[in-house]
C-alpha cells in the first residue's frame, strides 16, 4: 500500500512535511508533472491507518482568487 502523509502549516512560517513510501512519492511526482502539462491532476493514496484520500492538484495564475484564502489550520492564523 502506498502511504503519503502531509502535515500542513498550523500558522505562519511553519514547515510543511510530506512523508511517504517510495511508491506514493512517485505518484506525487507524476501527478505534479501531469499538473504542469494540463493544469490539473489528482490521485488516490492512503495514510498509515489505512484510510484513503484524494490529492488534487490545480495550477492557477498568481493573482487567482484561490490563492487569497490562507491555508493555515490554527484559527488565530486564518
Image (cartoon, rainbow, N blue to C red):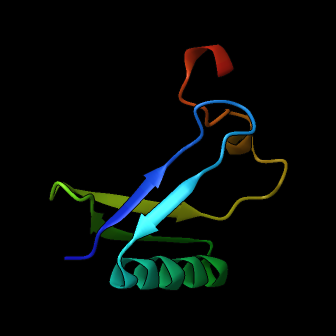
Residue at screen point 55% across, 83% down? 34
Expressed as whole percent of the image width and height from the top left, the position of residue 61 reads 79, 58
Instruction: Using the rendered view, name the quadrant where residue 33 is placed.
Output: bottom right
Quarter placement of the N terminus: bottom left
The reply, left or right, for residue 58 in relation to residue 14 is: left
Relative to 77, residue 58 above or below: below
Residue at screen point 41% across, 81% down? 27
Q: Is residue 78 visible?
A: no
Relative to 31, residue 45 above or below: above
Q: Nearer the viewer, residue 78 or 3?
A: 3
Residue at screen point 61% across, 37% down? 71
Expressed as whole percent of the image width and height from the top left, the position of residue 25 reads 44, 78
The reply, left or right, for residue 70 in relation to residue 24 is: right
Instruction: Using the rendered view, name the quadrant where residue 65 is placed.
Output: top right
Quarter placement of the C terminus: top right
Looking at the image, the residue that sits furthest to the top is 76
Relative to 10, residue 21 above or below: below
Looking at the image, the residue that sits furthest to the right is 63
Residue at screen point 57% across, 77% down? 32
Q: Is residue 28 visible?
A: yes
Q: Nearer the viewer, residue 24 or 30?
A: 24
Amino acid at each position: 500500500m502506498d502511504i503519503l502523509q502531509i502535515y500542513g502549516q498550523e500558522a505562519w512560517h511553519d514547515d510543511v512535511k510530506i512523508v511517504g513510501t517510495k511508491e506514493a512519492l512517485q505518484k506525487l511526482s507524476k501527478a505534479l508533472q501531469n499538473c504542469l502539462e494540463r493544469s490539473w491532476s489528482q490521485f488516490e493514496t492512503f495514510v498509515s491507518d489505512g484510510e484513503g484520500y484524494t490529492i488534487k492538484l490545480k495550477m492557477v495564475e498568481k493573482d487567482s482568487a484561490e490563492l487569497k484564502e490562507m491555508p493555515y489550520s490554527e484559527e488565530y492564523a486564518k
